[in-house]
Image (tube, rainbow, N blue to C red):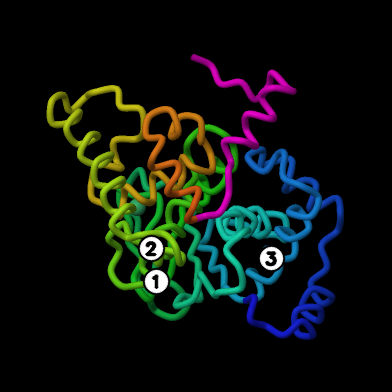
Amino acid sequence: MWSLSAWRRRRLLAKHPVADETWQRVRHHLTFLDGISAEQDQWLREASVLFLTEKHLTALPGVELHQEQRLLLAAQAQLPLMNLGELEWYQGFHEIILYPDDFRSPQRHRDASGVEHEWDGEHSGEAWQQGPVILAWPGVLASGNWEGYNLVIHELAHKLDMLNGDANGLPPLHHGMPVQQWASVMQSAYDDLNHQLDHNPDAETAIDPYAAENPAEFFAVTSEYFFSAPDLLADSYPQVYAQLSQFYRQDPLARLKHLQASDPRYQTEG
Ligand code: ZN
């Protein structure tokens, strides 16, 4: 979307105004944005509006989307792109489908275009190569805090990963980021996690054991932690944090530490 001409961009923003109160409610819900600068806030607000003009949100029955809900999703989707520049990082898909529940039981729904959607107890989100992103709305609502869970970032990290082929845990790295270094850092952390789980499948791992499924899930889960529990990730796998910090060109840990130093509400228990 950042390849749009400035004129077209201004026109789209003018056509889809966001009231200050609406944006404030979005910001209030998304506590993991706390501490961003006024300039970043402005970028995120505009990028969210433009994202919503680019992607079609399909809400299945049971999901009600007003502007505030749409922005809630869009702002979480845009946070990872904040410092990535004008490349179209979310190219190759146009639709985000929102399911009404977190898939506790088998579900089936045929939408207006005749496409059958089925989902079961396994997943709260999916990202298809060259296809839509699917999110369970309760998972979207449960995301956006500092608790180490972010469904939106998880599924969109898969999309970033897929930009250069299959989802394999290797997104297109920036100039100056050696693939070899990325691969060895990610592999050794992935091996460490798997080793712990091989030893004891019920081990209390520092990060969600789902990351041990395969390298693609490792990248998606650690991306979630990077933005929503950077302290946990940096404590357990500091080199992974450093690689992700180079990739996303952000330092959420510094932002969180700053918040924690000034406000006890941000201090995590245990
Ligand atoms: Zn995943």
Residue placed under numbered mark 1 in the picture: 163
Upstream in sequence: badge 1 or badge 2? 1
Which residue is painted at 52% across and 55% down in the image? 248
Q: Main secondary structure of the magenta part?
A: helix
- Where is residue 156 shown, x and y percent of the image? 46, 59
Q: Could you tell me how far apart the alpha carbons at marks 1 and 2 are, in whole angstroms?
A: 7 Å
**Left or right: where does residue 261 sit relative to residue 240?**
right
Q: Determine whether the beta carbon of the residue marked 3 sits less than 8 angstroms from the nearest atom of ligand 1.
A: no
Q: Nearer the viewer, residue 227 or 201?
A: 227
- Where is residue 136 shown, x and y percent of the image? 46, 52
Upstream in sequence: badge 3 or badge 2? 3
Q: Nearer the viewer, residue 123 or 188?
A: 188
**Left or right: where does residue 217 sit relative to residue 263?**
left
Image height check: is 117 above or below 10?
above
Which residue is painted at 57% across and 36% down in the image? 253
- Where is residue 96 shown, x and y percent of the image? 50, 67
Q: Could you tell me how far apart the alpha carbons at marks 1 and 3 are, in whole angstroms?
A: 20 Å
Judged from this view, the residue extending furthest toward the front is: 176
Q: Secondary structure at mark 2?
A: loop
Residue placed under numbered mark 2 in the picture: 171
**Mark 1: amino acid:** Leu
Q: Residues within 10 Å of mark 3 (few under 14, many from 20)?
A: many
Whether the magenta-drawn stretch holds residue 237 is answered as no
Upstream in sequence: badge 1 or badge 3? 3
Q: Quadrant of the N terminus?
A: bottom right
One can see residue 222 in this view: yes
Q: Which mark is residue 47?
A: 3
The range drawn in magenta is 248-270
Given contact means CB atoms under 8 Å apart, are the residues at marks 1 and 2 in contact?
yes
Image height check: is 25 above or below 148?
below
